[in-house]
Image: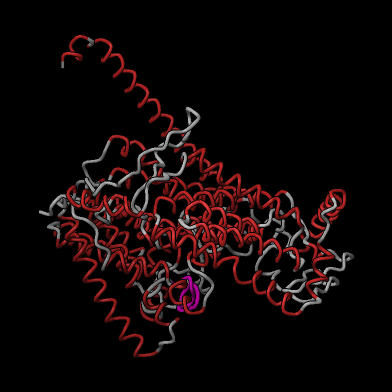
Amino acid sequence: MANAEHSGRRTEAFGATAVDTARTRLRVARLGLWLLAAVLAVRQVAVVLGNPRGERLTDLETWVGPDGVLHVNGSLYDSTRFTGTPFGGLVLKPLTRAAEQALGWGWTFGTLLLVAALGLVVARALPQPVHRRTALLAAPVTISLLMLSLPVRNTLWLGQTSIIPVLLVLLGCFVVRDWRAAGVLIGLAAALQPTVLLFAALLWFTGRRRAAAVTGASFAAGTALAWAAMPHDSYTYWVHHMAGVGLGGEADALANQSLHGALLRLGLSGPPEIGLFLSLGAVVAALGVRRAVRYARDGQLLLAVALTGCAAIVVSPTTWQHQLLWVLLAVVGRVGKRASDRYVWPVAVILVMTLPAKMMLPNMAVLYPLRDNAVLLAAVAAATVVPFLSRTSPYYRAPIPTEYARPVPTRWKRVPLLPFLKRVLTRPNLLLELLLIRVTYAAYQRVRLGATGGTNTGGRARAEAHGRQILDIERFLHIDIEHWSNHAVVKVGWLRDFFDFYYESFHFVVPLSVLALLYWRRPVDYRWARASLGFATLLALVGFWLYPLAPPRLMPDLGVIDTVHGVQDFSKPDYGTLTALTNQYAAMPSLHFGWSLWCGLVIAIVAPKWWMKALGLLHPFFTVSAIVATGNHWVLDAVGGALVVGGGFGLSYLFMGPRARFATATAVAAAEPARAEKEPSPR
């Protein structure tokens, strides 16, 4: 206190400077996020409108007649591609006098405005109290996530109206204060998507009974009006197709992420499937609305709305991809007592809603039911079982803090560049790690395959030219041993079998085993090693993209025998047994050797026994021998692999600082009692 009194002016000036700096950083961050949202919006417009007419706004073009003007006469459901309600068709009727191209531009920009409005309403509806920084950054972050989400992208591509019901519900729940107007808005949303009527139950059980009654009345009035104006179409939709079942495609299509579609994909059909669908749908609806009411009374109305929407997704006979925005809204729920677990749910939801299902799970037949119904499972989980924290929980605003290792001194003043990436003592959440590893590897596969346009033909000439360059360099350095070693190994059967087995089997097994062991025994070293491997792989992708290289086995005149994949037929444009799976010209740098070298170095650094270190270093030796002897890589490819691994360790050091050498499993065990004492007792 004495120091504060004697140096009051300096303290005040220092505090003011710190506050000004924080405000400046917040403004820059906010401006950057808004710029990102704008870039994503422009990109979506360019993607949609940059394609030919027949390949964009395909659902909207079901209204287009032979003269390029939206047709007025005829049934809405003649083409079976219009999946909306008759009331939705009635609302769209005034657009029948607009020309196709003008409607395309207007529809696309109008949809973007709806997405922006939706993001602003969601940001405003966050549960209170909200930190000022969160309040300022919530809107651009929300809009960016919406732009990236598959439902919005699908809506823009097809020209659908699915954003309108979501926006009407949110306006009725969070913006409009008059109960009559709120009921009318939600009722109109239900007239566009009938399962939105579940929100009437949410209104009723949360004490807004007059608004619930108006919702039901508005839905009935809109449906009756459409029936009076279009009786044939109304009969087709409500009676013949039973609320739209079978419209827009087969009900068992992967795009139908409803419980009905999942049961059909599992092979059920007929009365048993209908009975099971109705029974399970009733259970999900009851549990979803019950949980939504509980969270609404807890002050988390946005989460309650999201859970009700997730239940509506499940119970709808058909829920196409553009109707799945409710799942993304469930990201606002908080799950987990520990700070390290708090990111699992939002990351999982964002990945499910922004990435194709094939990137989420491996291409294994046993996982097809999970992969094909990923969004549906997320909706069911959110509506029924995910343990979202109550605002009265002591962990809601103050989760159990993460334990950090003491920082290790560095030689350079500004290292680490990202000091918030501290060395965490405890191991990360396993589910989150597996999810991120899988998504990262799927992205790696796509970028690697896309480096030559997805085919060998796309980069064959350039890759073979680079192969001749590498061969010339190796001849100059007198290290062109590929042909000699390949033919020497082919002559010895057991040696050929050994190197073939080593090449095919250890590339993934050893790195995953090292990561698993570090995760279990050395969590601090796990994070450091995982980051180094990730940076090395990222650098390798840059090499694949910039320098496609034909390996020796794919050089037509070199005479190298492909011992692993078999004889290649160079007369075919796309040859090689793995052409459809991976880029055959992603040889420089060699990640076979790079990942093995990473394994050897990590084992040599963290292993406690000298023989363990030596055994670890044998792995890259055997790997480089295998990749050269089997004709899959040049010697210089291994040099490139060593360079990217060195770069990976260097970037890890630069961003995160040195590894915490003294943080071991013993330190983690010692930290457990102290952390237990810090845990607040549940009320």
Residue located 75% across and 69% down the image: 630
Residue located 34% across and 36% down the image: 136
Residue located 29% across and 49% down the image: 339
Q: Does residue 167 appear anywhere in the picture?
A: no
Q: Does residue 11 appear anywhere in the picture?
A: yes
Q: Residue reaching furthest right?
A: 557
Residue bounds of the magenta highlight: 247-256
Q: Position of residue 76 (x, y in %)?
A: 48, 70
Residue 485 picture quarter: bottom right
Q: Is residue 207 left or right of residue 198?
A: left
What is the tally of numbered marks visible in this picture? 0
Is residue 249 one of those drawn in magenta? Answer: yes
Determine whether 443 is above or below 565 in the image: above
Residue closest to the eye, 216 or 461: 461
Q: Position of residue 241 (x, y in %)?
A: 41, 79
Residue located 29% across and 19% down the image: 15
Q: Main secondary structure of the magenta part?
A: loop
Q: Position of residue 676 (x, y in %)?
A: 20, 52
Q: Position of residue 462 (x, y in %)?
A: 81, 54
Determine whether 580 is above or below 649 in the image: below
For the N terminus, give its image quadrant.
Answer: top left
Residue closest to the eye, 448 or 614: 614
Residue closest to the eye, 408 or 182: 408
Residue 375 picture quarter: bottom left
Determine whether 28 is above or below 547 in the image: above
Residue closest to the eye, 295 or 458: 458
| Colouring chosen for the image of the structure | secondary structure
For the C terminus, give its image quadrant.
Answer: bottom left
